[in-house]
Amino acid sequence: MTRTPKVVVAGGGIGGLTAGIALAKRGIDVQVFEQAPAIGEIGAGLTLSPNALKAYEGLGVRDAIEAIGFDAEWQVVRRWNDGAEVSRVNRSGYADIFGAPYISLHRADFVEVLAENLPDGILNLGTRAVGAESTAGGAVLRLDDGREIEADLVIGADGVRSAVRSSIMETTEPRFTGTVCFRGLVPFDEVADAVQTKDWMLYVGPERHVISYMVRRGDVVNFVAHVDTDSWLGESWTREADPSEILDVFEGWHEPLLKLLASSTTYYKWALYDRDPIPSWSRGNVTLLGDAAHAMPPFIGQGAGMSVEDAYAIAAAIDYTPGDIPAALARYEALRVGRANEMVARARAGRDKYHLKESWDPKPVGEQNRTGIAHDDIYHYDIREAADFGASAPAVG
Ligand SMILES: Cc1cc2nc3c(=O)[nH]c(=O)nc-3n(C[C@H](O)[C@H](O)[C@H](O)COP(=O)(O)OP(=O)(O)OC[C@H]3O[C@@H](n4cnc5c(N)ncnc54)[C@H](O)[C@@H]3O)c2cc1C
């Protein structure tokens, strides 16, 4: 009989925590090493589309995640200067159409729920990975405290600046996408007069766009205001910003939107980075998932979704051939690399759709498709079916 493989995961963000849950659920011995001393996330929102929630249903945590999220009834696109509606899509039927809704939530609430759903003794906080290596018997993860953790498989889920990735392959620095964003959070009651509804909202305009949606079960509005820029002058890729910065950049935009943008108590300014797609994520018994493998800009809201699907898939692949990690990695990559890389390309194209360089006046509602759902092929995807490899393959190891 094959013994249970031991897997170590570097990074306890959305992908790493989900991988921990998925592997533990299949009885695989897993340890997750996260550099931060406590589980938490920058104060910001996140959307989870139906494909991601179907993965969580397969892991038994969909209800817990939906309980902290918000399911908007309408998705509304507006023109930047006068707020005229460009399109309006009813989202209330998404659960019936796609098998799960499209929700928005606070990142800190989300990672807390993931950590709570991890069995005790798996998550190691305050431990930074410095590199990984495939060995004759498996793989080793090196930590900054000098420890070397031996395992059958090391997974780098340590984000866009992955230490695991740079230790197993030649890799360039992440690419600045040419867009920065300002992010803020405002209690709904404080801006109800201006915002009026709890719809998911997108304002489109020349070289800029703003997305806003509800988090904390509909009590708080989250906004992300994107702007193209030739250079990122900050020393770090994220920093606190001054409200006057954002109001200068969006001068002349729709008045109710400006009220929302002016109302946050804290503003973060993020430079958006991605990576060029690569054809393979594994070297020996070390592999990657999430942003470490395929960082993409947020313009189709799929970065976290892809890391969640990856996490589900790697656990299913190992479960299928627990004694043969190379076979599991081949199956994992065959399922994931093409889809994730396609999302990188679609996400990059997303910016151009919202930020036209020339003078631009989107057509008013009525001349555009009012009900068409963009990206419906992404949402129909069900990783539970795609990664259903059947009963375990005969033991090899
Ligand atoms: C502005 C913005 C908005 C976005 N909006 C959305 C959205 O609405 N929907 C969506 O699906 N995606 C969105 N994304 C993308 C999404 O946030 C990422 O794709 C997702 O967080 C990737 O998860 P991950 O676990 O791979 O990486 P991360 O979330 O970056 O997690 C990596 C973890 O590894 C840890 N770590 C890093 N280095 C080490 C190390 N050396 N050792 C140990 N631990 C380490 C980090 O502390 C972190 O906890 C957005 C991104 C941005 C920038």
Image (cartoon, rainbow, N blue to C red):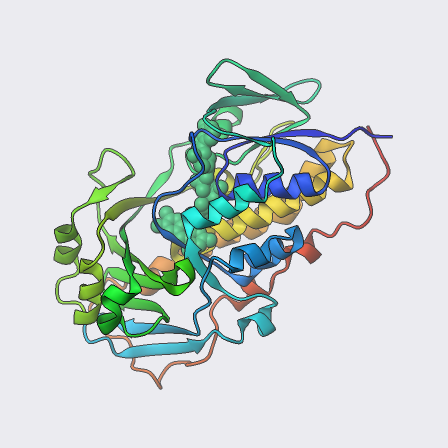
Residue in view at x 64 percent, y 27 percent: 284
| On screen, residue 368 above or below 336 | below
Classify residue 321 by image quadrant: top right
Q: Residue at image x 48%, y 24%? A: 127
The quadrant where ligand 1 appears is: top left
Specify whether residue 169 is in view.
yes
Whole-percent x, y for residue 55 in the image: 61, 54
Q: Quick check: 292 above or below 59?
A: above
Q: Is residue 271 above or below residue 58?
A: above
Position of residue 301 measured from the top left corner of the image (x, y, whole percent) = 44, 57
Let me know if residue 344 appears in the view: no
Report the residue at 20% width, 38% height from top.
Answer: 233
Quadrant of the drawing holding the C terminus = top right
Rendered image quadrant of residue 299: bottom left
In the image, residue 177 above or below residue 248: above
Q: Is residue 49 left or right of residue 118?
A: left
Whole-percent x, y for residue 2 in the image:
83, 30
Q: Position of residue 194 (x, y in %)?
A: 22, 71
